[in-house]
Image (tube, rainbow, N blue to C red):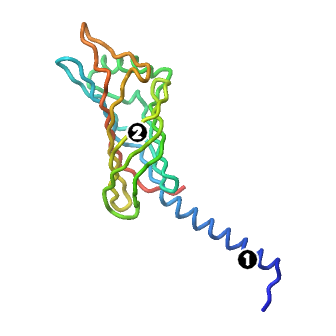
Amino acid sequence: MRMSFYKICFLVAIAANLSLVFISDTAAAQVWATESGHAAFVSSMPLFEFTGESEYLAGRISFPDSTLDFYLDLESLKTGIGKRDKDMRQTLGTKKNPFAEFYGRLHGAIDPTSDNSYPVTAIGDFSINGVTRPVTITGEIKVSGETLILSASWILRLGDYNIEPPKLLIFKVDEDQRITITATLQRISE
């Protein structure tokens, strides 16, 4: 049986469209998101240390293109003392720039369909106080069924983001802040 050129083109077009549907469904199944991750910083000064925390870290990881995007409403950070929270928000310039955000790409072999722990490196841009700088962050992704658990930490140097370290009397907060995040992400469909 001989098929005409037009029939062949028609069948190829149908096959191409069907493959796009299947690829799109597979790609969408590999997007994970959270709106309730944990973010914390540890701030030190001579003879004293305090922590700020938030349970409102939001973000997503997309395995089709290995991108991740996380952001935090800085107003949600709490240190346990209201006056210090107010001072911290002023120091971070939250009225003008209320969010901190990281957008980048994951590097490392991760199989989101296989329960395991994977060391990862994220390379991208971190923005806070209206300043965006390139950063490299190391961490781990643990795959467990329909859940991913991301944990990571890095040092944020305040001066790199035009943030003047606050001081109390003659003591100044350390320029380097340890940032940690933990987020449980669920598979979503696009």
* Amino acid marked by disc 2: Thr
Give the residue at x 20% y 17%.
Answer: 46
Foreground residue among 126 and 182: 126
Left or right, 189 with respect to 113, comes to: right
Q: Which image quarter is the N terminus in?
A: bottom right
In the rendered image, residue 181, in percent from the top left (x then y), is placed at 33, 40
Vertical side of 123 occupied by 92: above or below: above
Q: Can you tell which of label 2 and label 1 is closer to the viewer?
A: 2
Question: What secondary structure is marked by label 2?
Answer: strand
Q: Is there any visible trace of residue 53 in the rendered image?
A: no
In the rendered image, residue 95, in percent from the top left (x then y), is placed at 48, 20
In the rendered image, residue 55, in percent from the top left (x then y), is placed at 34, 38
Q: Is there any visible trace of residue 9 in the rendered image?
A: yes
Lower position in the chain sequence, tag 2 or tag 1:
1
Q: Which residue is mark 2?
A: 136
Question: What secondary structure is marked by label 1?
Answer: helix
* Amino acid marked by disc 1: Leu
Q: Residues within 10 Å of mark 2 (few under 14, many from 20)?
A: some
Vertical side of 53 occupied by 187: above or below: below
Q: Which circle marks residue 172 in the picture?
A: none
Q: Which residue is mark 1?
A: 11
Vertical side of 4 occupied by 22: above or below: above
